[in-house]
Image: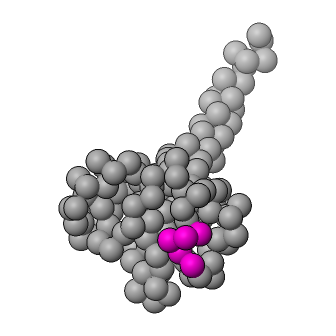
Amino acid sequence: MKFILDNWMMIAVALSAGGMLLWPVISGGGPGALTAEGAVQLINREKAVVIDVCESSEFAAGHVVGAKNIPLSQLENKLAGTVKNKALPVILVCQSGARSSRAVHIAKKLGFENAHSLSGGMGAWRSANLPVEKA
């Protein structure tokens, strides 16, 4: 107990540093995460395919222009049929970035090595003032 009391500042710094390292994983970032601007570059330069993994009602309320809807629960069965060329970049999108992060793991398991998650999801897309369409 004396150690904790004597070194409380170093412990606080260590905990906050650990929290900052974990934040990208918790907030939907992490491996394969893209910013909205990075997603636009992939769409324009490499003809990336945008897959929205939200439920149909969320997709109808607003989605990235040109996105195809495959709910996360159906992704494993329908992704290969929707995106024939596994070499194309695939951008997975949801409302917050959490479901699309899980979707990246599924896509990579299916052989889509160039799969990415939109960090922050549709919230980040809208914050960047990028176009949204409604079904």
Question: Looking at the picture, does residue 74 appear above or below residue 86?
Answer: above
Residue 113 sits in which quadrant?
A: bottom right
**Residue farthest to the top?**
1
Residue at left offset 45%, top offset 58% = 70
In this picture, residue 3 sits left or right of residue 106: right
- Foreground of the two, 105 or 9: 105
Quadrant showing the C terminus: bottom left
- Foreground of the two, 13 or 43: 43
State the scheme by which the image is colored: one colour
**Does the magenta stretch mainly form a helix, a strand or a loop?**
helix
Residue 17: x, y in percent? 63, 42
The answer to whether any part of residue 29 appears in the image is no
Is 82 covered by the magenta stretch? Answer: yes
Residue 128: x, y in percent? 29, 65
The answer to whether any part of residue 78 appears in the image is yes
Residue at left offset 60%, top offset 39% = 19
Residue 38: x, y in percent? 45, 74
Residue 51 sits in which quadrant?
A: bottom left
Is 117 covered by the magenta stretch? Answer: no
Give the magenta-colored segment's residue range.
80-84
Residue 84 sits in which quadrant?
A: bottom right
In this picture, residue 42 sits left or right of residue 115: left
Question: Looking at the picture, does residue 8 appear above or below residue 110?
Answer: above
In this picture, residue 70 sits left or right of residue 113: left
Quadrant showing the N terminus: top right
Residue at left offset 22%, top offset 66% = 133
Residue 31: x, y in percent? 63, 60
Residue at left offset 58%, top offset 50% = 102
